[in-house]
Image (cartoon, grey):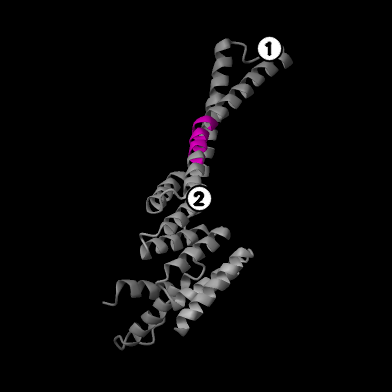
Amino acid sequence: MANANEVQDLKEKGNKCVKNGNFAEAVLHYTHAIKLDPQNFSLYSNRSLAFLKMQQFYFALEDANETIRLKADWAKGYFRKAEVEFATFHFSDALLSYKMALDLQPDDQSIMEAIRRATQGRQKDRKADEQIPWLGAGIGIIIGVTIVIGEHALTQKPTLGHPILMALLTIGIAMFGYGIARGFRYYVKCQRKALLQAPVDLLGDSKGENEDELATEDDAKGSNNERGHRYTKAQARQRFKKGKS
């Protein structure tokens, strides 16, 4: 009972921090509460919101997925997931999650409004995919025509005097502009995917250190001619992974 009271107290502290905009502190309170009650789906939901407000999208999505795993029939879990997907411009995924939330909580106005926003976002994104490359081509045509006109105006014997050469130059620059614009859209898509990728583990070498220690212990139990032999970290790690013959 005391544990339940402590969990509720931590949850309320976290909720208060969220209302005041202290999202990092809220995460700390929710995390402490989760350690005391790891099956409490509402804590993961609340922490997902706090992470989202901090733009820690990977952790926000992880908590939303954990909320769904613990309580698959709760609409808010899918709503949290959809909010992260919408914030990272994954509009199609967001629509699917929002609709799953709506199936569990029909006629909810906030969910219906979110679906409308996600639908508009997807439409704008698709329109951008269609229009921006052609905009790049249009800019290329303008540049090509400007070059041709400028050369005729500034030189007595233009190298692009023949109409075919003029057309080829203009078309070439237009195609180049189209390709640049398509490349830009591809770059944008990649950046959006990166928003949901796990952050770099700056402490990842700690696992290797543990492997080094195990490899050293393994060597100590080996034959007499191997005892006292010192290995580099890379060698020890390799021996640990392969196993000692």
| Residue 53 horizontal/vertical position (percent) | 57, 59
Predominant secondary structure, magenta span: helix
| Of the image marks 2 and 1, the number of the one nearer the N terminus | 2
Secondary structure under tag 1 reads loop
The answer to whether 97 appears left or right of 20 in the picture is: left
Which residue, given by chain and number where applicable, does mark 1 sit on?
A: 157
For residue 125: magenta? Answer: yes
The answer to whether 90 appears left or right of 169 in the picture is: left
Between residue 172 and residue 105, name the one nearer to us: 105
| Residue 77 horizontal/vertical position (percent) | 43, 59
| Residue 21 horizontal/vertical position (percent) | 63, 63
Which residue, given by chain and number where applicable, does mark 2 sit on?
A: 110
Where 127 falls versus 109 (above or below)? Answer: above
Q: Which residues are magenta?
A: 121-132
Q: CA distance from mark 2 to mark 1?
A: 68 Å
The answer to whether 158 appears left or right of 102 in the picture is: right
Foreground tag (2 vs 1): 2
Residue at the location (55% across, 72% down)? 12
Residue 81 in view (yes/no): yes
Residue type indicated by callout 1? Lys
The answer to whether 223 appears left or right of 60 in the picture is: left
Residue 233 in view (yes/no): no
- Picture quadrant where residue 181 is located: top right
Considering the image in quadrants, where does the C terminus appear?
Answer: bottom left
In the image as oriented, which residue stretches furthest toward the front? 107
For residue 214: magenta? Answer: no
| Residue 227 horizontal/vertical position (percent) | 35, 87
Secondary structure under tag 2 reads helix
Residue type indicated by callout 2? Ser
Residue at the location (50% across, 35% down)? 129
